[in-house]
């Protein structure tokens, strides 16, 4: 991809990675991603973040195409490899350049990339840096999603460069958002997988930038936002304490007993006007499961018994749900066993991060019978009651009772 101008003297010079399908060897990337880097070319030249080391050649080619023969400052908003992995190459190519960052990020960059200390210029929260005709302001925003993260604001052009924050894993030829529905989905997935564990801190960081006049948000993944309110209001919704009238059901069934229970349970929830998001863990994209957890009020995990415990895939999904710290309010468990097991203790023991009230699980012997379906009805009624008590239901749903 060639360099593209986002405003006079400001260029997007990063790379689109159409083919990448996994991040951190964990996170699915169904739509690829991009590693955005931005060049501000005025009296002094500044490069905002670098890119993933696998695509350093694209960044260098773009700088050459723009005739960049010197870089004064490389702004490092975040030390993670997909934004700092090209630093060593750029420092070598432009030996006069200095890295501008905060002390925590400097320490990480020195550790991760063995960059010598004398290549750094340290800035504090709200410090500014003059490029002569433009001014950069640095805003500390720790824990989105590493401890050293900061944002860079270009005052004269009212552009916020937030690195990971507000971004999306989306490979697209669009420099700016054109298809809002597509970007909303990708940005929500990104929030769910990467930012959700830091929800309360992100809320504070959103507060910190609320008085900035922002005309463009140019993140380091996905397209830029010419209408910043689109992504800011989405984030305000995701980080809010509000939950939706939704039940997320990750499950596995080996011989059909658990599946029979899940099918019955799901239909009963739907009949009561509750939205259900069901995930068969043998086939699920874990990103979709993470997205469903952003808004839901309740999780109900379904599992057969394997060697006295839950199915290992259920353990994996429960572990993920626990570390992602969604704002769930209620949890329960549905499952079946042949001759015994400790599934309930094991699953609930893995939910220490979740601030949920546990609703009485329905774990049965063998294939479900009449009394077991009654127990599932009882759980559905309990969920409905809890959602109602917490004002999670809308008026129309209340009318269905
Ligand atoms: Fe896009 Fe935290 O790296």
Image: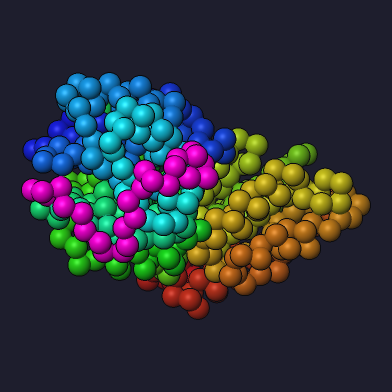
Farthest-out residue, bottom: 389
354 w.r.t. 369: above or below: below
What residue sits 36% from the left and 60% below the top?
141
Horizontal arrangement in the rendering, residue 345 relative to residue 259 (left or right): right
Report the front residue among 364 and 329: 329
5 w.r.t. 310: above or below: above
Task: Based on the picture, tell me whether residue 119 belongs to the magenta stretch.
Answer: yes
Please count the marks in the image: 0
Q: How has the structure been colored for display?
A: rainbow
Q: Position of residue 81 (x, y in %)?
A: 46, 38
What residue sits 24% from the left and 66% below the top?
210
What residue sits 66% from the left and 69% below the top?
358
Residue 5 found in image quarter: top left
Q: Quadrant of the N terminus?
A: top left
Asked if residue 247 can be seen in this view, the reply is no
Report the front residue among 116 and 279: 116
Q: Position of residue 121 (x, y in %)?
A: 32, 51
Report the front residue among 118 and 241: 118
Report the front residue among 23 and 293: 23
Horizontal arrangement in the rendering, residue 167 relative to residue 9 (left or right): right
Asked if residue 385 can be seen in this view, the reply is yes
Task: Based on the picture, tell me whether residue 289 belongs to the magenta stretch.
Answer: no
Q: Which residues are magenta?
A: 110-134
What residue sits 42% from the left and 47% below the top?
117
Farthest-out residue, front: 118
Q: Position of residue 289 (x, y in %)?
A: 53, 47
Q: Position of residue 276 (x, y in %)?
A: 51, 53
């Amino acid at each position: 991809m060639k360099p593209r101008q986002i405003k006079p003297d400001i260029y997007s010079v990063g790379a689109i990675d159409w083919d990448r399908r996994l991040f951190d060897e964990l996170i699915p990337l169904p739509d690829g991603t991009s590693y955005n880097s931005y060049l501000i070319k005025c009296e002094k030249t500044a490069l905002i973040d670098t890119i993933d080391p696998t695509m350093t050649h694209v960044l260098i080619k773009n700088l050459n195409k723009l005739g960049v023969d010197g870089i004064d400052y490389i702004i490092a908003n975040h030390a993670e490899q997909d934004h700092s992995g090209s630093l060593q190459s750029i420092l070598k190519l432009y030996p006069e350049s200095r890295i501008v960052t905060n002390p925590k990020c400097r320490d990480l960059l020195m550790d991760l990339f063995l960059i010598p200390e004398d290549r750094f210029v340290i800035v504090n929260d709200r410090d500014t840096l003059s490029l002569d005709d433009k001014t950069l302001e640095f805003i500390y925003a720790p824990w989105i999603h590493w401890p050293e993260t900061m944002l860079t604001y270009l005052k004269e052009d009212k552009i916020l460069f937030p690195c990971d924050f507000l971004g999306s894993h989306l490979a697209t030829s669009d420099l700016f958002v054109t298809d809002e529905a597509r970007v909303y989905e990708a940005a929500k997935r990104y929030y769910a997988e990467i930012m959700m564990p830091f929800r309360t801190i992100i809320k504070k960081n959103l507060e910190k930038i609320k008085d900035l006049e922002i005309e463009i948000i140019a993140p380091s993944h996905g397209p830029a936002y010419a209408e910043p309110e689109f992504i800011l209001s989405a984030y305000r919704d995701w980080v809010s304490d509000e939950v939706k009238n939704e039940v997320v059901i990750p499950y596995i069934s080996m011989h059909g007993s658990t599946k029979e229970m899940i099918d019955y349970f799901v239909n009963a929830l739907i009949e009561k006007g509750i939205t259900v998001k069901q995930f068969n863990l043998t086939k699920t994209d874990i990103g979709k499961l993470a997205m469903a957890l952003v808004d839901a009020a309740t999780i109900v995990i379904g599992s057969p018994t394997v060697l006295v415990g839950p199915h290992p895939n259920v353990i994996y999904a429960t572990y993920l749900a626990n570390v992602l710290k969604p704002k769930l309010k209620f949890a329960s468990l549905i499952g079946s066993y042949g001759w015994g097991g400790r599934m309930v203790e094991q699953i609930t023991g893995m939910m220490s991060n979740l601030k949920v009230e546990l609703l009485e699980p329905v774990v049965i012997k063998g294939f479900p019978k009449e009394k077991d379906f009654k127990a599932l009805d009882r759980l559905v009624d309990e969920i409905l009651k809890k959602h109602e008590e917490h004002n999670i239901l809308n008026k129309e749903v209340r009318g269905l009772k």
